[in-house]
Image (cartoon, coloured by chain):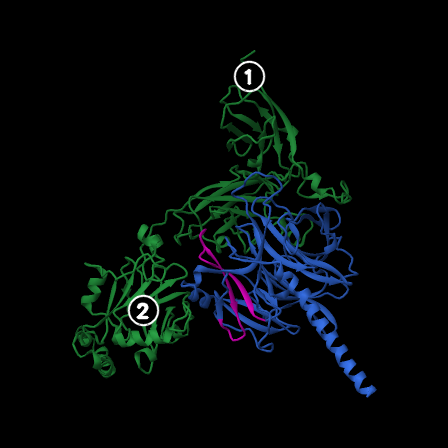
Chain colours: A green, B blue
């Protein structure tokens, strides 16, 4: 709760001469403006500000008036500032809870803590009656998302610029001598907001701005890189992808600034990665897909001709991810990450499922393991599925181990003796982007482009039969 | 008397003809909008934009794996000669959304060809809980949020992949959208597979029709080919035939005819230019000037590129390894650097979004 001292008329309104209030209001208002301008010039006079107050309330947040040079009419006295930063009592607004039209805190806010509280309605109260009447009159024909005479903006560098800022999106309500503003998006702690009181409302020559903010709470960096795939430290020189896993959701828009590929001398290899504005994240923004520039992998393209391949056989490299990368909360990573590896010969052989070794379970609760002669793409290999005789997919846990050369499957229910099939999605790739039975780069002199209309069939999954039976039962 | 009668008849004929044209055109024009239904589309994200006829805006929602067609109702141009200009638009949008400029992303920007207003897809926030926002800017530089509440819209879901397994981690980023011959073309990029994800969906959308998925191959110099993802594209007419002028993630510029975009078709783009290193196209427009066709291209690291499309229909596909510029000739307009978005405003002007040290300015430029 924030209390702003203003030089206005509540004391008069409390007297019995209410019928004369409006006249006095105008008179005293001008008088106070004059006096307070004088106060502003001499800081020691600030304490003498008249006791009338405008209150700004925002859920349970302690708001801070952050601009000491704010117009005198709204400057806090030191006493109020203290009560603000260390609130001893909360002034509860008189609310008509439960109706849509009432100005109240959101249900979310009352239920939960600060997270949902950032959607709270900002309540402006104790506004002098004359001002309130002016506002109500001006507002009577306006839609909810527009408000005359009062505006809410994000504070700019100068007061002049602040006045030019567009209004923050949200809905206004006027009720019971209170004005409520429910923002369309949550308030942002640490951001300076400006409440602009129009000159017609104040009857002054210029509008006034009250700057306020929700103090930002300092949080510690805790998000880290949990793993990077492939895990092997020998990668083919036509390596295509890396997957970077984080322990918490990350922020978008800055990924490529923080990922560096360095050579043996510690020099950064320029333009090593395909930079995509869209950034390839998963739904939770906890996994980032990094592609080495395919223009420098594919044979005969200009990027490769001009700059050469990114990785060369026999050389060592370091994939570095710096800790300045910010997580979804805006905090940096808790530490940087380094993956050192050596480039080996290019892999131009598409994976052949017939070369895979199937190790059937020995007991009903054992794992079924499939091993591959070379590491596979960590994400895509998880698409392997087992289907039973009824053509149903078996539920269970998949684990990829041994530097992505083994697929372990533990079924949810014990194995039943019978015939199964391994369903292999042809989109599964190895580290170099070679798909099942199809090279990354196809030599079209081997397979001419004459299969119009058949491409769909060619993408149907491969099925490999697997027989489950118990050796010890023999 | 006879003359008078024939004059009256003439007037009646003209009136009938005019009204037929008017209502006929209206009847045709109303077709697409009429197919949309009222409701509130729920977007999980907002990215690529494109305009279809009648002021219908196509919106790519990568996280939601959907394309939404929204009737903007913004079909009249109020000041056709006015410029689109606004400095520090990212700061102003951020302010409108009650946040700071480092907490928003402008994902795409398109001009509504009917009204000349600018539409911007914006993410408010950068975390996984970012809110998608659609903004509009008019010729006076006034910014507003385009409400998605109770609007006429249609939505089509994109199948994440060929099989039925639920893959919570796979997202297909919609990198470009286009409307040609009553079809919506969607270019996608998977965060798992390195493959072409081009879809052609008939419009109006039908729930049963998810559209055809086409494998586009990139043939490098006649011998090797890869199933490469298309990064961005624009519809373009070559010799009276609808084509797509597209750029792969690995920089070559290719064309392929729209009529070949059919289910199960394996298609290889004809490489018409190799733009070389660092010239990854971000946005492209085509225009005509002094009887010649040009392509204007904003790219990731150099100035705007102007490509002369003369003879594109006759060009021999680049099949040999060529050093230096290959295929179509181009100039780089060095003064226009840092262009992150580009769209055509009218026959003589384009609108750009220029990044100057983190401040994004909207400017109108004459087409070079």
Residue at the front extreme of this rendering? B1
Residue A152 visible in the current orientation: yes
In the rendered structure, find residue A211 and report the number of the disc placed on it: 2
Looking at the rendered structure, the secondary structure element under dot 2 is strand
Q: Is residue B118 left or right of residue B22?
A: left
- Chain ID at mark 2: A
In the rendered structure, find residue A470 and report the number of the disc placed on it: 1
Tell whether label 1 touches label 2 (CB within 8 Å).
Answer: no
Report whether mark 2 lies on the same chain as mark 1: yes
Residue at the right extreme of this rendering? B2
- Residue A101 lies in the magenta stretch: no
Q: Position of residue B270 (x, y in %)?
A: 74, 54
Quadrant containing the N terminus of chain A is bottom left
In the rendered structure, find residue B79 and report the number of the disc placed on it: none
Q: How many marks?
A: 2
Q: Quadrant of residue B298?
A: bottom right
Give the magenta-colored segment's residue range.
Answer: B116-142
- Callout 1: few (<14), some (14-19), or many (20+) C-alpha neighbours within 10 Å? some
């Amino acid at each position: 709760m924030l209390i702003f001292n203003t030089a206005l008329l509540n004391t008069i309104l409390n007297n019995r001469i209410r019928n004369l209030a409006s006249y006095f209001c105008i008179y005293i208002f001008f008088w106070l403006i004059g006096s307070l301008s004088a106060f502003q010039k001499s800081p020691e006079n600030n304490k003498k500000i008249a006791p009338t107050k405008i209150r700004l309330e925002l859920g349970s947040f302690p708001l801070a008036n952050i601009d000491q040079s704010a117009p005198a009419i709204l400057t806090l006295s030191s006493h109020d500032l203290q009560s603000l930063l260390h609130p001893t009592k909360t002034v509860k607004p008189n609310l008509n809870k439960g109706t849509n039209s009432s100005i109240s805190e959101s249900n979310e806010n009352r239920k939960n803590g600060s997270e949902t509280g950032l959607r709270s309605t900002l309540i402006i109260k104790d506004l002098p009656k004359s001002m309130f009447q002016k506002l109500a009159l001006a507002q009577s024909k306006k839609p909810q998302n527009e408000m005359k005479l009062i505006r809410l903006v994000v504070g700019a560098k100068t007061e002049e610029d602040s006045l030019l800022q567009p209004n923050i999106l949200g809905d206004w309500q006027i009720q019971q001598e209170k004005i409520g503003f429910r923002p369309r998006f949550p308030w942002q702690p640490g951001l300076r907001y400006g409440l602009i009181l129009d000159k017609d409302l104040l009857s002054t020559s210029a509008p006034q701005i009250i700057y306020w903010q929700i103090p930002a709470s300092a949080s510690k960096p805790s998000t880290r890189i949990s793993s990077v795939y492939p895990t092997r430290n020998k990668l083919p020189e036509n390596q295509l992808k890396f997957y970077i896993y984080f322990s918490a959701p990350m922020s978008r828009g800055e990924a490529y600034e923080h990922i560096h590929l360095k050579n043996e001398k510690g020099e950064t290899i320029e333009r090593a990665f395909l930079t995509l504005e869209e950034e390839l994240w998963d739904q939770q923004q906890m996994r980032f897909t990094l592609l080495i520039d395919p223009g420098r992998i594919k044979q005969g393209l200009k990027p490769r001709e001009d700059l050469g391949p990114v990785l060369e056989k026999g050389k060592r490299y370091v994939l570095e991810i710096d800790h300045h990368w910010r997580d979804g909360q805006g905090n940096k990573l808790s530490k940087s990450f380094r993956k050192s590896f050596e480039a080996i010969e290019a892999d131009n052989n598409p994976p052949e499922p017939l070369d895979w070794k199937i190790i059937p379970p020995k007991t009903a609760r054992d794992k079924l393991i499939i091993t591959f002669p070379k590491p596979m793409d960590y994400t895509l290999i998880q698409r392997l599925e087992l289907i039973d005789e009824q053509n149903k997919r078996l539920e269970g846990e998949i684990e990829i181990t041994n530097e992505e050369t083994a697929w372990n499957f533990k079924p949810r229910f014990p194995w039943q003796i019978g015939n199964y099939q391994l369903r292999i999605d042809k989109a599964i790739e190895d580290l170099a982007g070679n798909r099942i039975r199809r090279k990354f780069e196809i030599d079209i002199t081997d397979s001419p482009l004459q299969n119009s209309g058949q491409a769909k069939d060619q993408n149907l999954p491969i099925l490999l039969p697997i027989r489950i039976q118990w050796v010890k039962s023999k | 008397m006879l003359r008078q009668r024939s004059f009256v008849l003439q007037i009646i004929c003209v009136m009938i003809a005019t009204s037929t044209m008017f209502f006929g055109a209206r009847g045709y024009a109303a077709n697409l909008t009429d197919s949309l239904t009222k409701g509130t589309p729920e977007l999980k994200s907002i990215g690529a934009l494109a305009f279809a006829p009648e002021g219908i805006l196509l919106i790519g929602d990568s996280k939601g794996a959907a394309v939404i067609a929204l009737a903007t109702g913004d079909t009249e141009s109020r000041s056709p000669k006015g410029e689109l200009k606004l400095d520090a638009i990212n700061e102003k949008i951020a302010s409108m959304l009650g946040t700071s400029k480092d907490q928003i992303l402008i994902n795409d920007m398109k001009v509504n060809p009917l009204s000349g207003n600018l539409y911007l897809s914006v993410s408010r926030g950068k975390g996984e809980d970012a809110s998608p926002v659609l903004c509009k800017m008019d010729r006076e530089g006034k910014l507003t949020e385009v409400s998605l509440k109770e609007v006429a819209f249609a939505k089509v879901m994109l199948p994440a992949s060929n099989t039925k397994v639920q893959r919570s981690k796979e997202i297909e980023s919609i990198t470009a959208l286009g409307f040609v011959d009553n079809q919506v073309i969607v270019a996608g990029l998977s965060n798992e597979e390195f493959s072409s994800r081009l879809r052609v969906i008939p419009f109006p959308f039908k729930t049963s029709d998810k559209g055809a998925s086409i494998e586009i191959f990139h043939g490098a110099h006649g011998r090797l080919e890869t199933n490469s993802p298309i990064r961005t594209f624009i519809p373009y007419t070559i010799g009276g035939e609808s084509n797509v002028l597209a750029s792969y993630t690995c920089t070559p510029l290719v064309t392929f005819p729209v009529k070949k975009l059919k289910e199960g078709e394996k298609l290889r783009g004809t490489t018409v230019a190799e733009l070389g290193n660092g010239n990854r196209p971000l946005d492209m427009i085509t225009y005509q000037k002094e009887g010649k066709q040009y392509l204007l291209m904003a790219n990731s690291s150099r100035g705007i590129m102007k490509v002369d499309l003369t003879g594109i229909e006759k060009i021999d596909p680049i099949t040999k390894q060529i050093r230096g510029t290959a295929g179509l000739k181009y100039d780089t307009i060095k003064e226009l650097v840092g262009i992150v978005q580009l769209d055509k405003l009218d026959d003589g002007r384009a609108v750009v979004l220029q990044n100057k040290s983190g401040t994004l300015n909207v400017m109108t430029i004459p087409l070079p």
